[in-house]
Amino acid sequence: MLRLLLGTRQNGVHVCCCRRASGIRSQIKQEERKQRRRSVQEESASQVSPVQGQRWREKEVIKYESGTEPGEKKDTSGPLPPSYSPSYVEAAWYPWWVKQGFFKPEYQRNLRHANPEVFSLCIPPPNVTGSLHLGHALTVAIEDSLVRWRRMLGEKVLWVPGSDHAGIATQTVVEKKLWKEQGLSRHDLGREAFLDTVWKWKNEKGDAIYHQLKSLGASLDWDRSCFTMDETFSRAVTEAFVRLHDDGLLSRRRRLVNWSCALRSAISDIEVESRSLTGKTYITVPGYERKVPFGVLYSFSYRTEDGDEEITVATTRPETMLGDTAVAVHPEDSRHQRFSGKKLRHPFSGQLIPIVAHGLVNPEFGTGAVKVTPAHSPVDFEMAQSLDLPVLSVIGEDGLMTAAAGDWVQGLPRFDAREKVLAGLKDKGLYRGECEHAMQLPICSRSGDVIEHLLKSQWFVSCTEMAQKALQAVDSGFLKLTPSFHEKTWRNWLSNHTDWCVSRQLWWGHQIPAYRVTMAHPDQSQDEDAEGFWVAAHDEEEARRKASVALGRPGEELHLRRDEDVLDTWFSSALFPFAMLGWPDPSPDFKEFYPNSLLETGSDLLFFWVARMVMLGEQLTGRLPFREVFLHSMVRDAHGRKMSKSLGNVLDPLDVMSGASLQCLQQKLGSGNLDPRELKMAEAGLLKDFPHGIPECGADALRLALCSYRVQGDDINLDVASVLAVRHFCNKVWNGVKFTLAALGEGFTPIPMPELRPQGPMDRWILDCLRQVTEECEKRLHAYEIHGAAGAVQAFWVQNFCDFYLEAVKPVLKGPHASDARQVLYWCAEQTLRLLAPFTPFLAEELWQRLPCAGSSRPPSVCVAEYPSPSQAAHWVYPEEELRFDFVQSVIRTLRSIRSDYNMTKARPEVHVFCSEEEDLCSLRAFRSPLQTLSLSGPLHLHLLQCGPHPEDPRGWAVGQVTGNCHVHLQLQGVVDPHSELLKLKSRHLKLDHELQEKTRNRTGDLEDKSLLPKISKIQNMMETLQRMLEDKKASP
């Protein structure tokens, strides 16, 4: 090898005629390297650990068995288990945190680094109906990371837990349970007994959610937890209703409402999903054994009163024609002008109905003539009001045809009546055919039922004025939406809002605090359809006083009957940010923590919840309920499908944290409320996605995996394998700290951070990296870029600390500079655990508690320790070491790649590195020892080459290109068996060549494959090198 070199040997460096790079060229190179490093860091910080779809092996479960009493501090005096086990790590810490009061805002007074900032928010209250799913877990992971970070910054933090009574969902679950176990309906029990049953169920099952939250490590203030049906919260709901009514923003009106026949209740506009149909589509409707066709346009004719002419109309709902009270045409449609003033005879009732003209008619639809069914169509209802047409309801609350439809169909389900109506039209010779028709079908998001529009007297909140204020709040910047692209959707929705129907025909929920007042005797019959006089009041006594004043009659002459309906669940949820703090009372919590600092929730709740909180918060308190809204993406399964119980892809976070067998997952499905058809489909989905069950991943791994996704953009396709990959990272942290503890040894005392100013290049380089990751975390967390902060810490620990520094420092620990290295090891581990604490609280606490104390004022827990700040690490700025080691790393990677190509494991071959720039050579000289250690090199030689042609590739040596100005030679002779390696390479070459030929045959024109050709070329070069070695071996005597 040395025969290739020119010049003389100086200090172990073979020098060829040197030429220094100019200062400008050097600066350009430095900037290029710095930009390359930033790009790599940005890419690492924005990616989840890339383990997708891998098979998993069961890990050993290690239990913590020291007998710590609940609430007592965990015993960390024993040795660390040999490997990371979530069951061991997560034991005992949470009850101790709660007992110590770390999660309460009052604890801030104990912090040496306390600051005057206040940070408050509420958890989006999950439904009390069952358990959290992974979408909830994402919310918890994000919010708890922000809460723990703010608490570690020294702020006064309040995070309030709560749960929602979920009117429709809870009543449905309990009704199904009641029918399944006792064969009874709620009507069999009666209202009072049924509500007792719901409360009993809630008290038995309601704590399951809180158990999940605690298992996830959510640092909530449990002493302030609230439930939307609690007495204090119910009082706030009543107060809100009464105030809105008194302010003229809430009134009772008879209008068409969105009605779910399956629920037998009205629902609001935003609880209606529009399903796009391109043509005839068969859809499952609750209560029907067969699927029902939609997306069909049926045509039939009405004959004129004298029977001489007919007019043809088209409809997608022929059953509603029994409620037709007119036929309408556009006033400018010349095709139907001859029918002006005429009447048509209804083919089934015999009633005469008018032909009317109205501008709402679309002359392009069907024949241009449309049937008018005011009781079952919002557009028709509007026409009927302007034309004073009668309104005839032919479909009832239960989805059955009413007496008004006629005896021949009365009591039939609406879609069964459709077939009978069509048959009747054919018998009368009035049917004119059908065709496929693209349409939007309204579906109840709660029940999957096809929405029916029914005429009902309900309570409506007028949103016009409040919506305008909500728009102005965002436009003026007083309310910030993150990500900002949601502002467009916010404006579109609030600019096209409708009044909010808040009546629900349920028993479970807040009974509407409104009373119908009459002067008739209670025993006398009342006209239930008549609106009557209504008052809103906190109780009946107040209602009687109000009615007496309004009507000028003595209270004892008045009969009051309270509305039996309950309020929409979203009405009470919209009060959460202030009702949880004691509103309407001026409580200390309300004064200190309202408005909330932040509202964090899923983007799907922007209108269901967020907009309504903003509107009611500002209206009822005079202030916005929060200053900023952070909306995260939706969680889908690994295939990009929406989480659905019927698909079997709704996972309990506890199953991901603790692990679950396939049998266990199937048993959970069976114990639910799925019907047999849905259960069969769900079981098939489970078997496909989790044939071996789910491995134990732990709460920390689940939290960090969720936080590693970019939650401000597209939906998240969560793969359990990604969570398992983060568990591997947790094990990496475990082993890294375990190594650090062993290296520190007994009696180690850390010096204060400001005093740590090492001289070793590797020590300075890793501390500079630590400083930069601290800056990155601060910047990212302030911008709610959680994935960036989580990714930056992971990248630092794995790519910088473990892959390079730990390996490089091992020989140093045996030498004279061990003292500095130990201090650096300690502070890297200590600061990284603090950086990780918001994301992996259990792991961070377990390991941080075992590190030696740095001074007597150490906080009792990492969760109340000060979060690392750039100002604390400002003295660790080492740009020269950073730039130099950036180049050294590229050399190391090149040498490691060559070793991997030739299957070298323990061998330490001789290495020569050639540079044509002195600056690069200086970098290699400064990091000579780490370079040799990290590349597993034997004798290492560094050379400065004169610009010009490089030496020819020597026989028996592998050559690698680092940059245009640097290449390496690694000895193969005597280290690699050329014969066996050549056989392996020939096999790989044939396989790749065959793959390239297959791709070429399947393409047209382009014969080049960008991924395969470089691989083939590389293998060919390696084969030539080994072949020359064999030739030399044969030629030698």
Image: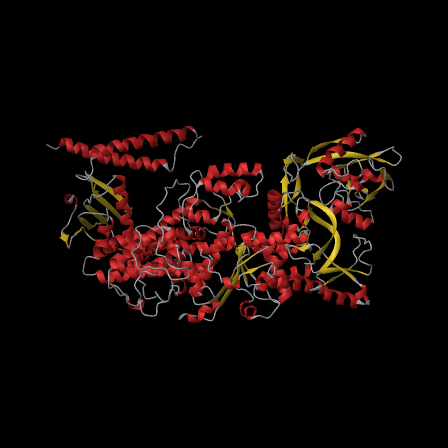
Q: Is residue 1025 above or below residue 914?
A: above
Foreground residue among 182 and 1037: 182
Task: Let me know if residue 782 appears in the view.
Answer: no
**What x and y, as percent, mark residue 621?**
62, 67
**What x and y, as percent, mark residue 371?**
78, 40
Foreground residue among 894 and 287: 287
Q: Quadrant of residue 847?
A: bottom left
**What x and y, as percent, mark residue 139?**
50, 54
Foreground residue among 874 and 351: 351
**What x and y, as percent, mark residue 765?**
29, 58
Q: Is residue 86 above or below residue 296?
A: below
Extreme residue in the left direction: 1037
Q: Quadrant of the N terminus?
A: top left
The number of discs equals: 0
Is 223 placed left or right of 884 in the picture? right
Q: Residue at x 73, y 39 (%)?
A: 365
Extreme residue in the right direction: 306
Is 606 placed left or right of 844 in the picture? right
Task: Let me know if residue 710 appears in the view.
Answer: yes
What sort of colour scheme is used for the picture? Answer: secondary structure
Is 496 placed left or right of 479 in the picture? right
Q: Is residue 330 above or below residue 1033?
A: below
Q: Quadrant of residue 246?
A: bottom right
Q: Quadrant of the C terminus?
A: top left
Is 792 placed left or right of 261 in the picture? left
Q: Residue at x 78, y 68 (%)?
A: 549
Q: Is residue 1019 above or below residue 767?
A: above
